[in-house]
Amino acid sequence: MKLDAKTVYAQSSDIKSRAYLEYRRDMKRKAIAELEVRGWLESLLRKTYNKKSITIEKYGGDRFLWFLRGGGVTQEPDYVVRGLDSEDIFFELQYANEEMGYYDFKRSKVGTKKRNEKKRIPKQNLKFLYLIKSTPKYAILSPEWIIENGVEKVAAAWGSREVYAISNDSLKTQLKSDKALEEIWSTINIKNHILDFQHQKIENIKEGFSHLLQKVVDEEKIVQFLPRSLDSFFKVCFILDNINKTPLNINMWIVYALHFFNDKVTSEELYQILYSVDFLYSKALLTETELGSLVSFINSVKRKLKDFKRDDVAYRTSKNLSPIEDTRNIIFSINLLEDLTQDILFYYGDEYKDIELKPLEKIFENVDGIEQVYEFIII
């Protein structure tokens, strides 16, 4: 079981709660693109090599995990291509939001350099897929080509790292076009919009806390946290999360949080349960029994989500909530649910081979009718 990174995060994280939530969202943007583009790239390579046996898989630590709970990013390639006559080859995905003067590639990803050698050695069995966002344009570049045509410089956008900068004119010589990419970019843009839409829930929760606490002074209201209350339990978890503190009896808290779930749960209750579970899980080491209970909970929630979808494309769970907030709550819950699923497979999958969870092929795949939901939330 991969506990090193998890133990480090459980003890102390450099990413505090507020920044961490932003980090998770930002990391997910590239993951959305990687997972949506994978199938297109597989089809392209099958045509290029005339081999139907070619398959492409996500590679490395982020095969399951879109973000590291302790911060940072994996340095491994994004894809591995299998089914070629030769050995496997790897792909890095990069894209620009628009056409630019120069396109940067990290030197460390392009090639290696030994001591006392002036030139970098291009990495073998590696290619770069470069896309121009929301256009059908793409280029497949080799490390050799990047080194030969790039200018070495330090890029502020990459954290002042050393890069090879490829000019617009040079990249244009390699660009090709495939209209199929336009539909893929449409899906990516929809999912990014939904990602931001559900993330607004965090700001709404903070705003609610702000009003509640101000009433203590302005209106002499008493703030109470009640035992056996889901709302109080959630608020305690939210506060602890935002001050970067961990309950002493954290495993017991996880079991307690799971007991709040039932068949009559509303979207308001569901996101409170899932937020609490996600916060507690991220700082705990689970026993096999506790893990089994969490997996059973995740699968129960997935089944319950199907009951919440309505013909008008909104999610409806309560007459006391507006359709837009009901829908936001459900998508916020799905976002947490999918993160939990992938995280469990990454950290516990090696030890417990019979975990009854399937890895996600795409982000927000549990959102039923995602295009219709998107149309509903932008009205």
Image (cartoon, rainbow, N blue to C red):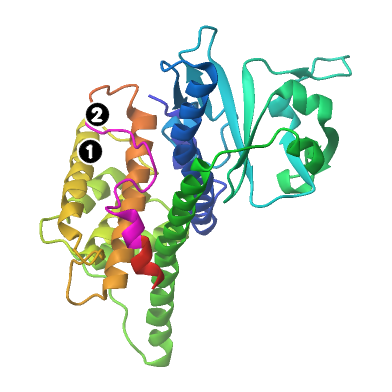
Residue 248 seen by the camera: no
| Quadrant holding the N terminus | top left
Going from the N terminus, do you reach mark 1 or mark 2 first?
1
Check the image and report above or below for 91 versus 217: above
Determine whether the residue tagged by mark 2 lies in a helix, strand or loop.
loop
As drawn, the label of residue 355 is 2
With 288 as the anchor, is 146 left or right in this view? right
Residue at 42%, 91% in the rendered image: 218
**Which residue in the rendered view is the most extreme toward the bottom?**
219
Magenta span: 356-373
Residue at 40%, 74% in the rendered image: 209
Residue at 45%, 69% in the rendered image: 203
| Quadrant holding the C terminus | bottom left
Is the Cβ of the residue at disc 1 closer than 8 Å to that at disc 2? yes
Determine whether the residue tagged by mark 1 lies in a helix, strand or loop.
helix
Q: Position of residue 348 (x, y in %)?
A: 34, 29
Q: In the image, what residue type sits under mark 1?
A: Val
Residue at the disc numbered 1: 295
Q: Nearer the viewer, residue 102 or 271?
A: 102
Residue 80 lies in magenta, yes or no?
no
